[in-house]
Structure formats: structure tokens, C-alpha cells
Image (cartoon, rainbow, N blue to C red):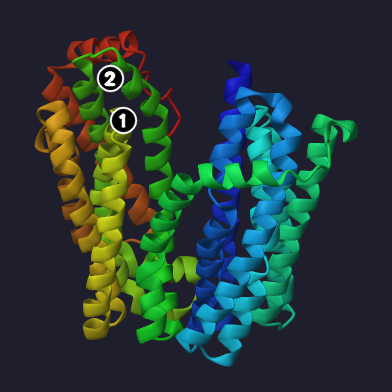
Amino acid sequence: MRKLVTNIIALLTSDLLNRATTFVVYALVARYLGDFGFGQMSLALLLLYTFYVFAGLGLRIYITREVARDLSLTSRYLVNGSILVFLAALLSLGVLGLFVILMGYTPSTALLIMVVGLAIVPYSLSSVNEAIFQAWEKMHLIAYANIPHNIVKVGATFALLAAGYGALEVGIALVASYFLTLILAWVFTLQMVGRTGIQWHVDLPFMRTTLINVLPFLGLESVIAIWTSLNALLLSRFGNEVDVGYYNAAMQILVPVNLVLYSIVMSLFPRMVREFDQHSSDLQRVYEDLIELLLIITLPAVVGLMLLAEPILLLLYGNASFANATVILQIVAWSLVPLALNRALGQVLLATMQERVTLRIVVINTIISLILGLILINLYGVVGAAIATLVTRLINLAQQYQPVSQVLGSVGLVKSSWKAALASVGMGIVLYVFADRLNLLLAIFTGAALYATLLSLIMLWSYGGIKGIQAHYHYLQTRGIKPAPSGQTL
């Protein structure tokens, strides 16, 4: 258990640090370079993360699974997997260059994209090492390799911007930080398996077989990467860097809520799988508890973002021009609701072994997102991109609702949402009346305290008092679902 908890904490720490420091880089660029520089950096990083998926070939999941089954295959997958990824990274860089030419970006933006794109090579190569760490259950080594990268990323960005340098110099520093991660990953790999544990043998038939086996992983990850980045890419084509900056500024504010939702869903996923394998009728109750928990977190966040959008943007990005993203944030904030529901519904599909349904839904989402983006962005610009994001997530919800309802018999969204919805409405009314008289931090604290109070009272009433809540808590414990200890985030 100690090892399991350590590995979970290590993975979460690495992911949170990567996302948090990336947001700090965004915030620093916004403060020092304004909305145009922010838009340039947003576009460069978006393309880096998108083309990294293609360069990674879906190998991380596959290598983790195969090496975990047989640790003696470590050297074989490490060496040959790294060669495959290196070749794919070079190919991705070439395609990225062609993409930049076809999109017709300004020379300064194109140069920044290609410089930052060089990080595809170390970024994708280090993912092979991280797969080996996961297979050996040495997840703390992933965090050790990424911590210096994040320190350099933030420190160098601040130092360069404070000294008067621009986005290009920041991009070079980012690339250097990814190479630092790759070097450390190899140092830790050599320490873990030993120098004699790695045989530098190139096995072409093995590489060919591996490439064939990872195609399903690559296909799914590639479609998801294209879908999630499509609106921003269309916006960069039909709009400009400033539009991309405003859209990304709004989307970045949703990341913390998304991370919390993801952590909750993944913690309950094993329970869903076991309930399905045992043909238990309790799968529906687990699902309903999950939906209720996700909405308890999501609905007040949506209400708060709707009412406090402008001061939140100004506080985080420190530039008055980002007030122009207020309407965008208010629109995309509503997409958190279908996102939360999709998180739960999607896990039900995976737990009930309906991966093909999931792939079909993702492909349809990508096609619809392309059509909506072309129409709405042409008509309404960056606001159209925000609307397209919301509508696509609603369509995704509609697609997942039907197959899940067939599995569970009843989805019960109203039953799982009315408590959080009622408490959120009460909080929203008070914030709407008094928000102008309070500073942002006091408004957030007041809203959170009021929401917690209202939700507690509603829970007491709906469960029939303290005894009813204790009975529900006892049920959760008997099913192996333990509520978060006091002081921890739900």
C-alpha cells in the first residue's frame, strides 16, 4: 500500500507540476508581452503538444503494459522504442514545418513555432523512459526527472522576460528544459537497470511488430489530440494570434477543475470494473455517486466563473486587455458541466468494455468539431470558437448518454444533480447581489463558504438527518468507496 500511494502521489505531483508551471509561463508571457505575445506562445505550445502525440506513437501505454508483464524486455523496448520515437519525432517536425507554411503564419510566429517544436524530440524520447519507470513501478523517477525541467522552465522564463527578451528566447529556454528532462531520465534509467542491463541491439523485426501493435493506441490518441486542438487551430487560420490568446486564456482557467474531475474518475474506475465483472447491480449506484460528486465540484465552479470572469482574468494574467476574454470564459465555463458528465459516462463505457463505441464517439466528435468550427469561427471569430467548444461537448454527452443508459437501465442525471444545482443557485444569487461590493478573493471565499453551508443543509434534509448520512457512509465503506478524509479535496 505504501508503494502504491507513493506511485500515485509521484504521478499526480509530476502532472500537477507540469500543468501548473505551464500556466505560470502563460501568465508571465501575458504580463510582459501582452495579448499578441501570449497568443504566439499559446499557438506554439498547442502545436508542440499536438505533434508530440504523433511522435510518441502511442508507445508509452504499450511499453508500460508489455514491460510490466516481463521486466526482461526492458532493454529491448527501451532501445528499439527510442529509435522508433526518434524517427517519428523527425517526421513530425517535418510535417509541422509544412503545416506552418500552409497556415500562412506571420514570420515571427512561424519561427517561434518551429523553435518550440524542436522540443518534440526530447519530449517524445523521454516518454519511453517514463514508460519503463511506470512498468518497474518507479514512478517517483518521473517526478525527479521533471522537477528540474519545471524549475528551469519557470525560472528562465521569468529571468528572460524581466531582462527584456521576447517570446523567441523563452521558446529556446523551454526547449533546453525538455532536453534536461531527457538527460535526467536516461541517468535514472541507467541507475535503475544498470549499464550492463541495457543491450544496444537494433531489432528491425521487433520494431516492425511493435509499430503494428501500437497503431490502435496511436489512432485513438491522435484523434483525441486533433479534436481537442481543432478550434484553436481553426482560430489561428481564420483569426489571428490575439484571438488564439484570448481563447487559450479562458481554456487554461478550466484546467484545475478538469484535473480534479479526472482524479476522482480515475480513483473510482477500478470499482466500476469490478462491479461490472461481478455482474453487480451496484454499478449504477457507484455511477450515480460519481455523477453527484463531480457535479458538486463543477456546478459552483461554473456559477463562480460566470459571475467573476473578468476579475479572475485580470488577476491571473495581469493585463487589462484580457478583459476582452470575459465573454469567452463565460461561454466555455458552461462546458464544464457536459465535461464532468462525459468523464463519468466515458468511464462506464470503458469499464463495460465498449472501447469501439468510445473510438466511434471520438471520431464523430472530431468531424462535428471541424464542421462547427469552420461555420462558427468564420461567423463570430473567437466567440464562435467558444460556442463550438460548448456545443461539441454537449454532442459528446448526447452520444455517450444512449449506450450508457442501455448498460445501466437508467442514467438518473436529475437525481444526481439537484442538490448541487440548488446550492449553486443560492450561492449565485448572493454573489450576484454582493459581488460588486467585495474584492475577488473575499467574493470567492464568501461564495465557497455559502455553497458549503447550503449543500450541507440540503444533504442533511435529503438523507433524513445525521443518521441517514451515516448509513450512506457505511454503505460506501462496505462497497470499498471511501469518501475523502477530512481536509482533502473531494
Q: Residue at x 53, y 46 (%)?
A: 212
Q: Residues within 10 Å of mark 1 (few under 14, many from 20)?
A: few
Judged from the image, the secondary structure of the residue bearing numbered disc 2 is helix
- Looking at the rendered structure, the number of numbered marks drawn on it comes to 2
Q: Residue at x 27, y 64 (%)?
A: 367
How far from the left and from the top, in percent, is residue 137?
65, 27
Q: Nearer the viewer, residue 255 or 54?
A: 54
How far from the left and from the top, in percent, is residue 402?
13, 41
**Which three-letter amino acid code belongs to the residue tagged 1?**
Met
Q: Residues at badges 2 and 1 in contact (C-beta under 8 Å)?
A: yes
Quadrant where the image shows the N terminus: top right
Query: Residue 369 lies in what quarter of the image?
Result: bottom left
- Give the labeled residue for mark 1: 353
Q: Is residue 213 left or right of residue 308?
A: right
- Give the labeled residue for mark 2: 276
How far from the left and from the top, in percent, is residue 480?
36, 13
Quadrant where the image shows the C terminus: top left
Judged from the image, the secondary structure of the residue bearing numbered disc 1 is loop
Query: Residue 263 lies in what quarter of the image?
Result: top left
* Residue 452 seen anywhere in this rendered image of the structure: no
Query: Residue 262 lies in what quarter of the image?
Result: top left
Q: Nearer the viewer, residue 322 or 167?
A: 167
**Which three-letter amino acid code belongs to the residue tagged 2?**
Phe
